[in-house]
Amino acid sequence: MQNSMDDQFSRTELLIGKDNMDKLKRAKIVVFGIGGVGSFVVEGLVRAGIRTYCIG
């Protein structure tokens, strides 16, 4: 049985494939500034499956 995190991204995995989903899970990103645009960028990246990020 899948855990809730994997289930949450199951549709994304169907769209981009398992290998690319694994790349997103391992990705590390930095976003400088979370003003008007940055906040939407961070939200989109988190919803896409990126688990490690730093907000500067």
Image (cartoon, rainbow, N blue to C red):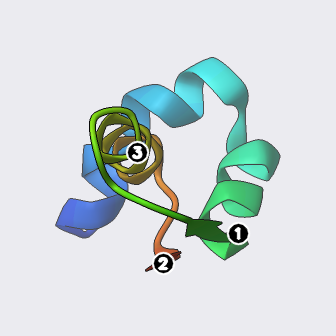
Q: Residue furthest top?
A: 15
Residue at 61% x, 71% y: name it.
Answer: 30
**Residue 11 percent across, percent down from the top left:** 40, 27
Q: Are marks 2 and 3 in contact (CB under 8 Å)?
A: no
- Left or right: residue 35 versus residue 18 is left
Q: Which mark is residue 38?
A: 3
- Helix or strand or loop: what does disc 2 sit on? loop
Q: What count of labels does the image hold?
A: 3
- Left or right: residue 56 versus residue 20 is left
- Helix or strand or loop: what does disc 1 sit on? loop
Q: Residue furthest left?
A: 4
Say whether disc 2 or disc 3 marks the residue closer to the N-terminus: 3
- Left or right: residue 17 versus residue 35 is right
* Residue, disc 2: 56
Residue at 43% x, 39% y: name it.
Answer: 41
Q: CA distance from mark 2 to mark 3?
A: 10 Å
Q: CA distance from mark 2 to mark 1?
A: 17 Å
Q: Quadrant of the N terminus?
A: bottom left
Mark 2 or 1: the one toward you: 2
Q: Are marks 2 and 1 in contact (CB under 8 Å)?
A: no
**Residue 14 percent across, percent down from the top left:** 56, 25
Q: Assess disc 1: are there few (<14), some (14-19) or many (≥20) residues with their C-alpha within 10 Å of its C-alpha.
A: few
* Residue, disc 1: 27
**Residue 19 percent across, percent down from the top left:** 81, 50
